[in-house]
Each structure stands twice: as structure tokens, then as C-alpha cells.
Image (spheres, grey):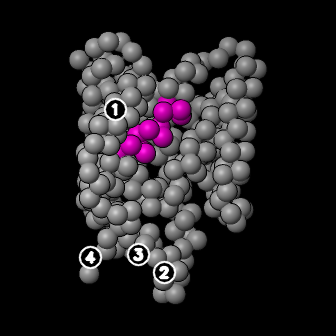
Amino acid sequence: MNLYPYISCIFIAIICAILSVIIYEKNWLILTGGIAHTAFGGIGVGIYAGFNPMIGAAGFSLASALLIANKFKEKTEVTISILWASGMAIGTIFYNLAENPSAQITDYLFGDIMNISNGSMIFLIILSIIVLALFYMYRDLLILYLSDREYCSVRGINVKILDNIILIIVAMAVVAMLKLVGIILIIALLAAPIAIAVKLSNDFTHRIFISGLISLISSLLGVLIADKFLVNSGASIALVSCFIYLLSSFIPKKSNKHIHIKN
């Protein structure tokens, strides 16, 4: 029995637990979707040029994240949509131009966690450790940054640098999960858990714990379903996430939208 898919679910949950809360508080969900779809352009270029498509995905993801953070004053839906469409168009064209494509494009669109490679597993573990370590060291700064951006600036904290650092980490998280849950379905794993957590608590740490738990349950159940019924793993993980979210609609809302800061 291949345990890699199940083990990878743990590290996916760690990444999603922390980043989904940040993405939610910053209203960056659509932005993250734009980064993910822009990465498809790098995948197509990589397949066409004959190098590792994940390197291309990382390059395009980082470029789009830094462009949004530094070149566009307003992170509008129009700008994100243009990057989104451009990435998908570039990836499709270059994939069509490739004479002998070395990879199945559906693996990147919908994911294939059942066949996770050693390299993808190592990258996922390293990134989850980095995310967890940064959260542990800078938790208080992160809460302040998310709750009061103007106060951060008054205290001399460079919020622009923080924006860049977080977007770079988000871009790398997108790359880490591309082959696991897919470009199209990655948003479900980032959106559903935090949407449930928001209903249950307005405490920052509690939301991270709840979001991570939901991500883990969704991933494990999705892998089990994919393993048993031989269906696409990314689709099954996303479907489980959405189903759990629908069930949560029957839970009375006990919190407000904003995080609560303990003195």
C-alpha cells in the first residue's frame, strides 16, 4: 500500500491551515486563484521546452504574485482575471505546440496525489516546515498585520515587504499543491475549511486549528474515495471539502468576520 498520498495530506493540512486564514483575512482568495491559473502558463512552457514543468510553474507563479504586489496599486478583479486568462492561454498554446508532450496536462489541472513523486513530497514537507516555523516565530506580528495595516505602518513595520513575503509563500504553496489537487481545484481546499472555521470561532489560533483539521479530513477522505473507486483524487478531495462546507451551513454562526486579538 502506498502511504505517500496519506502522509502528504498531513503536510497539505499544515499549509492550508495557516495560509487559508491569511488569505481569508486579506481577501486574497481570488488573487490566489489567479496565481494558480497563471502557473499553468509555466507548465505549458516547461512541457514545450523540455524542462521540468514545475520549474516553469514556480517562475510564473512568483512573477504573477510579485507583479500584483508591486506593479498594480489596486489588486482589482480585472487585473487578476487578465493574469488568470493569460496564464491558461499561454499554457494551452505551448502544450499544443509541443511535439511529444512528456506529461499529462490533466495531472496539473485536476491533480494526482495518488502518484506523488519523491521530489514533490520533499518540496511539500520543506514548505510546510517553513510555513509552520514562520508562523511560530512571527505569530504576533502576523495578527497585527492582518488586523490593522495602518497601525503597522505607524509602528515602522514595512507592510509592503510583508505583502511580498506572504505572496511568495502563497505562490510556492500553489506550486507545491499543483500536482496533488490541481490548478482548478486548489481553491476549494483553501476556501472551504476557513469558511467553516469562521462560523465557529473569531480567534486567530482557533481558526487555524479548525481550518487545518477540516483540510486534513477532506484530504484523507478524498484520497480514500479515489483509492477505492479509482476516480481522480483532486476532484474527490475538492468534492469532500465542498460537501463538508454545505453541511456546515446548518451550523449556527457563532462568530463575527474579524479575528479576535487577545491582550
Q: Earlier in the sequence, mark 2 or mark 1?
A: 2
Q: Nearer the viewer, residue 243 or 74?
A: 243
Q: What whole-number distance in Å separates the C-alpha atoms at marks 2 and 1?
A: 38 Å
* Any part of residue 157 in sight: no
Residue tagged by mark 1?
243
Q: Which of marks 4 and 1 is nearer the N terminus?
A: 1
Q: Nearer the viewer, residue 153 or 62?
A: 153
Q: Which mark is residue 152?
A: 2
Against 196, residue 201 (above or below) is: below
Secondary structure state at the residue bearing disc 3: helix
Q: Residue 223 carries which label?
A: none
From the viewer's perspective, is the residue at label 4 or at label 3 nearer?
4
Magenta residues (range): 182-193
Q: What whole-number distance in Å separates the C-alpha atoms at marks 3 and 2?
A: 7 Å
Question: What's the amino acid at mark 2?
Answer: Cys
Q: Is the C-beta separation of discs 3 and 2 under 8 Å?
A: yes
Asked if the magenta segment contains residue 191, the reply would be yes
Q: Residue 262 carries which label?
A: 4
* Horizontal and vertical percent position of residue 62: 60, 50
Callout 4 crowding tier (Cα within 10 Å): few <14, some 14–19, many ≥20? few
Residue ID at (43%, 45%): 191
* Any part of residue 78 in sight: yes
Residue tagged by mark 3?
144
Q: Earlier in the sequence, mark 3 or mark 2?
A: 3
Q: Earlier in the sequence, mark 4 or mark 3?
A: 3
Residue ID at (27%, 31%): 220
From the viewer's perspective, is the residue at label 2 or at label 4 nearer?
4
Question: What's the amino acid at mark 1?
Answer: Phe
